[in-house]
Amino acid sequence: MSILVMRPFPDNEATAAALRDEGYSVLLSPALRFEPVPLREEPDALPYDAILATSANALRGIEGKPILERLCETKLFAVGDATAQIARNAGFRDVESAAGDAVALIALVEARMRGKGRICYLAGADVSRDLGADLGAQGYSVTTLTTYRMIPLPHFSEAVEAAFAAGEVEAVLHYSRRSARAFVAAVQAAGLEISALALPQFCISNVVGTVLQEAGAARVRVAAAPDEPAMFEALQRAIAPKRPSRPKTKSGKL
């Protein structure tokens, strides 16, 4: 029996490795495909007072582009720790994590900037919440730079469809509203509504969980916090791994 991870590549690989370390069997089925967006025009007036990143993909979208070097000296506010680490790896020197969701990120910006300053918001083509508009309404000058889009993948792989048919999928992990919608579309395309939506659906937030509930899923469980550790805690409370977790060193690494 396996845990199906709908998270897009490359983040799904890290999730799969962490789940396997905990003793779970894993199947990967990315619901979305990352695609960088050509920057039609870069912001004219630099420097900014702050950069805003709500996902690692927003940073991946500027990898190798001239604007990355120009922005690296600017303070960056990240939605969570994983995005903050990606920013540091990309070369940003002053990074602070909100360790939460969009609401926590806005609160962090308010606490540090107090309603003043120019912000460059690195965003996707489709966002569940427009932080640029939210912050603009609070008095900030916000430039939204769309750096990437996520393309829904309409079908499961043959291996995943076979796993559903054989009853080998034990639960599904969902990390975004759009990936949850892509999952529902793939389920419908494969004619798997009854079996797939009957499984436990573990969601990173209530917004994601609502997508599954509206599609007919009855066993939707939402993480206590919008991050992966909380997702794993919810999973472990409901479904015990089938084998012992791998031993870790004192540093926590294998």
Image (cartoon, helix red, strand yellow):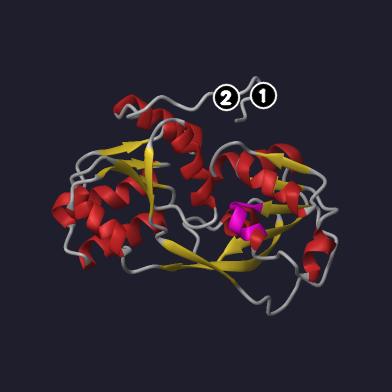
Which segment did they paint magenta?
A: 53-59
Relative to 63, 28 lies left or right: left
Q: Which residue is mark 2?
A: 248
Residue furthest to the bottom in view is 40
Q: Nearer the viewer, residue 231 or 137?
A: 231
Q: Which residue is mark 1?
A: 251
Q: In the image, what residue type sits under mark 2?
A: Lys
| Image location (x, y in percent) of residue 214 | 23, 52
Instruction: For mark 2, give the secondary structure.
Output: loop
Work out whether residue 239 can be spotted: yes
Residue 149 to residue 253: above or below: below
Contact (Cβ within 8 Å) of mark 1 with mark 2: yes
| Residue found 16% across the figure and 63% down from its top | 191
| Image location (x, y in percent) of residue 224 | 42, 30
Magenta region includes residue 45 = no
| Residue found 48% across the figure and 33% down from its top | 21
Work out whether residue 139 can be spotted: no
